[in-house]
Image (cartoon, rainbow, N blue to C red):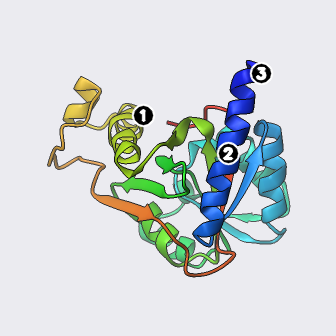
Amino acid sequence: MNENLKKRNEVLADTVIKGLKSRNMTGYYAKDKEEALKIALELIPENSKIAMGGCMSAHEIGLICALEQGNYNYMDRAKMEPREALLAAYDADIFLSSANAMTDDGVLVNIDGNSNRVSCIAQGPKKVVFIVGINKICSDIDSAMKRARNVAATANTQRFDIKTPCKITGKCSDCKSPDTICCQFLVTRYSRHEGRIHVILVNDNLGF
């Protein structure tokens, strides 16, 4: 990575981490995927019950492989019935997620179709660990929402082959399609419970 861009990302991450602190959330900066994995594993005690909300970023830093190979109780929702997976996630010690977008003052923005992910971010699991690539940082709520709808959501319709207008056009049309994945919008601007929400900012482009 270009050194100027690397330095810019470092100072931007510092700004975001200060914003998170003001919102009773804890932020960390990882210079690369390897450091992100190290930080994540430090936040996850062995024998923890761990659930995840379809987080590609966790896969990209190698976290899921590490959990599956280590002494952890990782609950793979793909191997569970949907209702069983949802209830198990609510009772998890750790919930892993990314953000569809995030503001530079520490607000997290997420969109969900089935709403299992956003509901677990809001309540239930004892600790939530976000893995967020620097590519998801936006200047304000409006730009974060636009990113979530026009980048993250549209990419996910390609990923899951979902029949919505944005799969064809590549941009959000605010549809009411039966297959829409933009059913619930969660804006996390503050954590009432200190020590519950942790955000690892990674100096890399992760996820959508």
Q: Earlier in the sequence, mark 1 or mark 3?
A: 3
Q: At numbered mark 2, what does the secondary structure look like: helix, strand or loop?
A: helix
Q: Is the Cβ of the residue at disc 1 closer than 8 Å to that at disc 2?
A: no
Question: What percent of the width, then of the height, locates residue 159?
Answer: 42, 34
Can residue 192 be seen here? yes
Left/right of residue 160 with respect to residue 91 in the rendered view: left
Question: What percent of the width, then of the height, locates residue 58?
Answer: 65, 47
Q: Give me the residue at 67% from left, 66% from top.
A: 50
Q: Is the Cβ of the residue at disc 3 closer than 8 Å to that at disc 2?
A: no
Left/right of residue 74 with respect to residue 124 in the rendered view: right
Q: At numbered mark 3, what does the secondary structure look like: helix, strand or loop?
A: helix
Q: Is the Cβ of the residue at disc 1 closer than 8 Å to that at disc 3?
A: no
Task: Please name the amino acid that badge 2 sits on.
Answer: Ala
Front of the two marks 1 and 2: 2
Q: At numbered mark 1, what does the secondary structure look like: helix, strand or loop?
A: helix
Q: Nearer the viewer, residue 36 or 73?
A: 36
Question: What percent of the width, then of the height, locates residue 76?
Answer: 61, 58
Q: Earlier in the sequence, mark 1 or mark 2?
A: 2
The residue that disc 3 covers is 3
The residue that disc 2 covers is 13
The residue that disc 1 covers is 159
Which quarter of the figure has residue 130? bottom right
Left/right of residue 113 with respect to residue 14 in the rendered view: left
Front of the two marks 1 and 3: 3
Task: Please name the amino acid that badge 3 sits on.
Answer: Glu
Task: Please name the amino acid that badge 1 sits on.
Answer: Arg
Q: Nearer the viewer, residue 104 or 90?
A: 104
Q: Quadrant of the N terminus?
A: top right
Q: Nearer the viewer, residue 167 or 75?
A: 167
From what the image shows, is residue 35 above or below residue 151? below
